[in-house]
Image: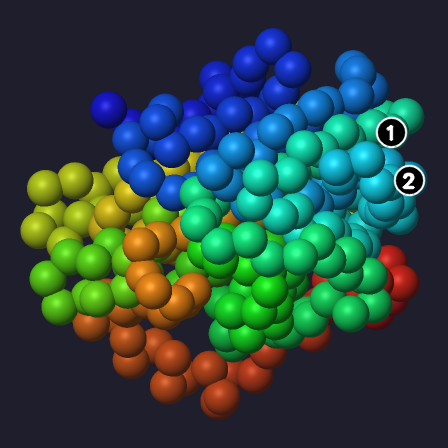
Amino acid sequence: MSNHHRAGALATQDALVTVTPEGAGWDYSGLEVFDLASRPVRRALDGIEGVLVPLSATDVEVSVDGETHTLAGRTGVFEAVSDWIYLPLGSTITISGDAGEVALCTARATERFPLCVTPAQEVSVEVRGGGRASRQVTNIATPDSFTGADRINVCEVLTPGGNVSSWPPHRHDGIGDCAPTNEEIYYFRIGRLDAPHGHPHGQGLFRVYTVDGSSDETVTVFDGDVHIVAAGYHGPSTAQPEYPMYFLNVLAGPGAERTMAFCDDPDHHWIRETWEQQGQDPRLPMTSAAGRVAR
């Protein structure tokens, strides 16, 4: 069965997307996406820690065990970098706002860390890759950018139209000689030209294949799709020329320490050596805390 899910396929009564460890057939990573125009959302984080990221919502109120915090948010994932909040293991939360989407990224955890609100201005943004493999990585709760979590890792990747990311293909499935082990969720939003958020006509491509070659799948990605990557090499994520690609990554695994290490497909590892000569795409970074980066 394919691990690619079309927009709406993982919807539940109060969520646009619901991925649980049980539903994914793994042990740690989860994701819910909510439209705050519907109603306030309440969750008890029993056995899990969370990272809440506004996607296309502003002035988001988050009540955590009775204490309220306000996130400024953003109007869309292609418009700006957002602030975010780390939600401790075992907390009870209520999320409310006038409209727009927010993502609740989760991981099963055993150690409780304190609540933390990170302003957009303090979120690390970097440009990775080179040439047509240039992309923006917004480090939200990654091991190097945020140490106050047990297992969860969260980042955003923005790929300009015509470029690829998740390149070279890589894996972190703990199989054979690849020790890093993380379950990874890709939540895609596909824009159109300068649109601030996803567009219903947007599309891209995404490839996942196993080490032994028993499975090799390239799928067309539409706005709002989800891919659950349990094992195997993944990449490239390909943005069509007029349709920039965004994806939110949620990763967690069994390691004693949080990691986002990976193993390249050895046939393509050499590509990294070419990036310095190619230079990076001048359209990057695409966004900042202040908004879209002018060119």
Q: 10 Å neighbourhood of mark 2: few (<14), some, or many (≥20)? A: some
Residue at numbered disc 2: 59
Tell me which corner region of the image, top left, top right, bottom left or bottom right, holds residue 39: top right
Q: Nearer the viewer, residue 220 or 183?
A: 183
Residue 183 placed where, x, y %?
Answer: 35, 47
Q: Amino acid at mark 2?
A: Asp
Asked if labels 1 and 2 touch by Cβ distance under 8 angstroms, the answer is: yes
Q: Nearer the viewer, residue 241 or 69?
A: 69
Q: Is 199 situated above or below 181? A: above
* Quadrant of the drawing holding the N terminus: top left
Residue at numbered disc 1: 97
Residue at point 43%, 29% (across, down): 20
In this rendering, the count of numbered labels is: 2
Residue 78 placed where, x, y %?
Answer: 74, 49
Mark 1 residue element: loop
Residue at point 43%, 59% (across, down): 166
